[in-house]
């Protein structure tokens, strides 16, 4: 082992030991905006130009950028876009393969530790880069089209590996490992407290990553059968930093939205996906949702989903009245243009100029 690697391992050990000594409350960072501020963001299409066009057309720099990645995937291209945009990342993790959509790992396998190597990599990546980020694992677990959902679109249980119990346990494991902050014995003890097996990944303790974990469901479920309600998928207060839901213009269940907000009254609230999804301009929806967010003081995050390509039915530029309504709302000082400590642009290559 060379000296550089030895120093790196020593630094990891020291940080892990320090974090192990911190009280639990000090470790549960939520990355909240200050005071009455609300972070606004936009989804990452994979094309850095789209972030710039969106910002220019709304005359507002989004503080957040949300990327959607598959389990186990590396994402250096996403990191470059976060850095170029100088926007704090929100990382949604799905277990669907990006190519053909098949399931890469089940909730039961995650809970049992068979995905630990990837979770450890995420923990160390955000710690090493000193990059505050929100991790949104397995969003919309009560949407039947997601491969990790418990119920199919007829309301029938998929199989034993996808029971809501396994989803809750998988989420708890993700929360514990990605947050890190302790020796291996400490991490194993936290896992054991919730009935989970010890770490399966090699190595020692885990540093405390500057991340917050967001749990998000549909307000009422799809399908809307009793067993698919959000409460059956909640991992517990101890394993959630933020609570959130998606809220599109074609599914405006305001009663369910407010009900979900009220049910989890001790957590900051997020809407990690919203947007025009009907193919028709809807400035009234935009006005009402932005007004709802400002009127509910724990709502601290809104992210517009713009999907991919100029012809996308979600693209805000296709709806001039909605774009104007959103732009006008975002120019209120409650929406900051940047989150604290945004990702830094990568350094220029040796002997050359930055692109």
Image (cartoon, helix red, strand yellow):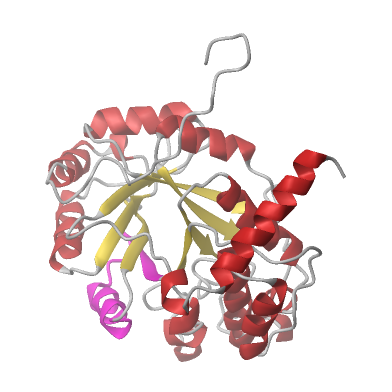
- From the viewer's side, name the closer residue of 85 and 329: 85
Hey, which quadrant is residue 327 in on the image?
A: top left
Q: Is residue 4 left or right of residue 132?
A: right
- Residue 217 can be seen, yes or no: no
Where residue 28 appears, as percent x and y from the top left, is: 44, 71
Residue at horizontal 36%, vertical 40%?
315
Residue at horizontal 64%, vertical 54%?
124
Count of numbered labels shown in the rendering: 0
- From the viewer's side, name the closer residue of 78 and 224: 78
Where residue 194 appears, as percent x and y from the top left, is: 61, 88
Q: Is residue 352 left or right of residue 284?
A: right
Q: Is residue 11 left or right of residue 280?
A: right
Magenta residues, start to end: 242-265
Identify whether 262 is placed above or below 348.
below
Residue 325 on the magenta span: no
Where residue 254 appears, as percent x and y from the top left, is: 23, 72
* Quadrant of the snapshot with the N terminus: top right
């Amino acid at each position: 082992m060379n000296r550089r690697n030895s120093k790196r391992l020593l630094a990891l050990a020291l940080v892990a030991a320090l974090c192990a000594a911190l009280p639990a409350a000090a470790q549960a960072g939520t990355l909240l905006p200050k005071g009455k501020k609300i972070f606004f963001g936009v989804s990452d299409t994979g094309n850095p130009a789209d972030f710039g066009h969106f910002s220019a057309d709304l005359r507002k720099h989004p503080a957040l950028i949300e990327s959607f990645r598959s389990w186990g995937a590396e994402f250096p291209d996403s990191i470059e876009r976060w850095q170029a945009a100088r926007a704090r990342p929100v990382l949604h993790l799905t277990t669907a393969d990006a190519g053909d959509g098949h399931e890469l790992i089940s909730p039961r396998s995650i809970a049992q530790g068979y995905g630990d190597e990837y979770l450890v990599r995420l923990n160390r990546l955000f710690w090493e880069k000193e990059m505050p980020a929100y991790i949104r694992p397995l969003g919309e677990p009560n949407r039947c089209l997601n491969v990790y959902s418990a119920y199919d679109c007829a309301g029938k249980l998929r199989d034993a590996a996808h029971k809501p119990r396994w989803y809750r346990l998988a989420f708890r494991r993700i929360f514990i490992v990605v947050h890190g902050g302790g020796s291996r014995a400490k991490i194993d003890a936290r896992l054991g407290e919730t009935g989970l097996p010890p770490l399966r990944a090699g190595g020692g303790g885990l540093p405390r990553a500057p991340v917050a974990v967001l749990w998000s469901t549909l307000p009422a479920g799809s399908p809307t059968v009793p067993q698919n309600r959000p409460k059956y998928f909640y991992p517990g207060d101890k394993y959630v930093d933020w609570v959130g839901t998606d809220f599109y213009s074609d599914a405006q269940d305001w009663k369910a939205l407010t009900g979900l907000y009220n049910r989890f009254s001790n957590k900051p609230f997020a809407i990690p996906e919203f947007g025009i999804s009907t193919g028709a301009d809807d400035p009234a929806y935009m006005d009402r949702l932005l007004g709802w967010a400002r009127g509910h003081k724990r709502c601290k995050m809104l992210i517009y989903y713009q999907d991919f390509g100029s012809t996308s039915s979600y693209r805000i530029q296709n709806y001039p009245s909605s774009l104007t309504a959103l732009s006008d709302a975002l120019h209120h000082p409650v929406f900051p243009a940047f989150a604290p400590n945004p990702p830094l642009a990568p350094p220029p290559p040796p002997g050359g100029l930055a692109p």
